[in-house]
Image (spheres, rainbow, N blue to C red):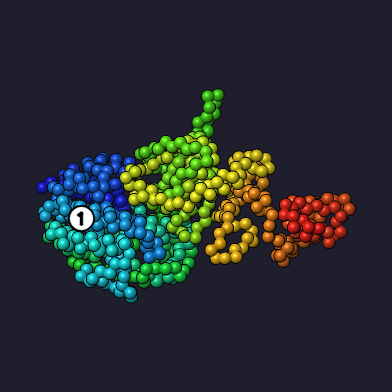
Amino acid sequence: MVKKIIITGGLGYIGTELCKIYSGVSWHHKIIVIDNRFISERVNQIRNWNMEFIHGDILDKNLVNKYFKDADIVHHLAGVTQVPRTKSESNAEVDKKIKLVGEKGTQNILDIISKNCKIIFPSTHVVYEGIDKVKNDIREDEETKPVLSYSSSKAINEKQLKESGKNYVILRLGSVYGYSTDTARIDIMPNLFSKIASQNGTLKLFAGGRQVKSLVPLIDVARCFKFMEERQDLSFGVFNLTKDTLTVKEVAEICKKYNPKITLRETNDEVPNLGFSLSNKKILGTGFKFLYNLEESIKEMIIKWSKQDLIKDLEHVKDGHDLFVDKRGKISNHELTEPINLIGLIDSKKGTIRANHYHPQQEQKCLFTKGQIIEVFQDIINPNSPKITQVVNEGQLSIIKPNVAHTMVFTKDTTFLNLVRGERDHDNYGITHTIKHVFVDEKEKNLLLKYYKFDCRSCGNTNLKRVISLGYQPLANNLLRKAKEECELYPLEMNYCEKCHNCQLSVAVDPKKMFSNYLYTSSTSKVFRGHFVNAAKKYIKDLKLNKKNSYVIDIGSNDGVALKPFKDLGFKHLLGVEPAKKFSKVSQ
């Protein structure tokens, strides 16, 4: 019998693997894959497997009615996956989105499918995250204890299915781990640890790594969905789908086994609980067998990711290569690591601002064909990350990683191409592809436009290289009198000129503001004073300086800390150049 099988969320982490499994039977059944994203190479592969791809959303009742009313099997994988892991990460906007997609979308499907249709749904082990103490081998019939929006929504989904009167199977998944080319859920601990380990990084073990985790291999999850579709005798049931039970520290130690170069660092960071594990006796009793294991999966992920040239910067700018120039003009090339299915052409006027948002899933690539911007960006995953600036010029490609807030301040009339992999449907703005995150206001924009320096102060070179950014900082020693008092912040970043080797700051603050009440005194540091004593002796020896004839000039002399050792040694011709008037008096 030919079955009509629908896979929602078919471009996701589990959906991609499930589609691969169904590629072996798609010539004998009608397979429909539905996703609100559009990733061109995967959609093309699905179509080559004789499956139909529908770019749509389960919140669209007309779409659900059109495709689901005569379905035989529904693998309902669609849902929000970028979810808060702790209470401190939660916010009302994200919680609302999780509830809307999870509950309304599921109800739309349940309202339409027939009683003969079997719906197979992935719930989650975190429906038990409210358990106070570590508990092992939790069975399917134990009462759920959700806390955060994701687990609460999944618990409601389970109730929706049980009360629907429709034929259902609920698979309560452990944390799903395993390699995938570009759909891998890096927010899942074994995957994240493996990726960090592939780059010789540091694994941070929150709460000392004591948290217990229930884990399950990715491909075994996809296999189990197919298994449940084939087993007509399994229906109206909940099954825990989990294979491994380990602590976070034990997973980290497996990573270190396959890459001894990594560092394990225990921290006291917040975790929602110390963990629990689910019993898998019921699923094993059906005859389902797990074929994959954690050690082999971690080894595979570390090996495969270690061979990739992973760019660790949150945002980076690339020049074109293979430049060709003749009397007609010039050609430069930018090689992209992934297919592009949508190009946005964007014009912006000098002095305006764009973005102030982030992309939870997609990497953003912008190719600038004219003009110049100051890009401001910040990692929103790490609450202590600095806000950093970067200049992007005509002909350069700017690449911004997922979950990095960024803003464009246009210093010239500018044209750029927004190179998109996936969808940019404006109906989904703020839901799937772009989340508003205002972190650069008009005041800061005007400050950057007024004080930012694009050319080398010494030779005029426009191609300056960033050495280090310390984020936004107040002026030196400008201590506040009150806790709620505000002060102006400026980017504190050092650039390097490859032509004249001058190091300089990216922002030059108004000298009147900087030096009218300048508070930093170099001589307060004993180490600093000692450094200049040693430096003076070295300069005298290396440069063969003479007390009577040599002329020593210190530009930016502060209180004369660098000139004083020369004076103590009897040098007569000394000059300090200092914009802060009070220090010029002190140094005299």
Q: How many marks?
A: 1
Residue at the outermost bottom position: 133
Percent x, y of residue 83 = 35, 58
Q: 172 left or right of 402?
A: left
Q: Position of residue 67 (x, y in %)?
A: 18, 45
Q: Quadrant of the C terminus?
A: bottom right
Answer few, some or many: residues within 10 Å of disc 1's Cα (few below 14, many 20 plus, some between 14 and 19): some
* Side (left or right) of 238 relative to 415: left
Q: Residue at x 38, y 58 (%)?
A: 187
Kindly identify the residue that appears in the image at 80 percent across and 60 percent down: 565
Q: Is residue 310 left or right of residue 84?
A: right
Residue at the spot x=34%, y=50% of the render?
Answer: 431
Would residue 73 be seen by someone viewing this image from the given angle? yes
**271, above or below 505, in the image:** below
Nearer the observer, 390 or 23: 390
Image coords of residue 238 (percent x, y): 20, 64
Q: Residue furthest toward the top?
A: 327
Q: Residue tagged by mark 1?
A: 107
For the residue pair 222 and 185, the one nearer the viewer reads as: 185
Residue lying furthest right in this view? 548
Question: Element type at marker 1?
Answer: helix
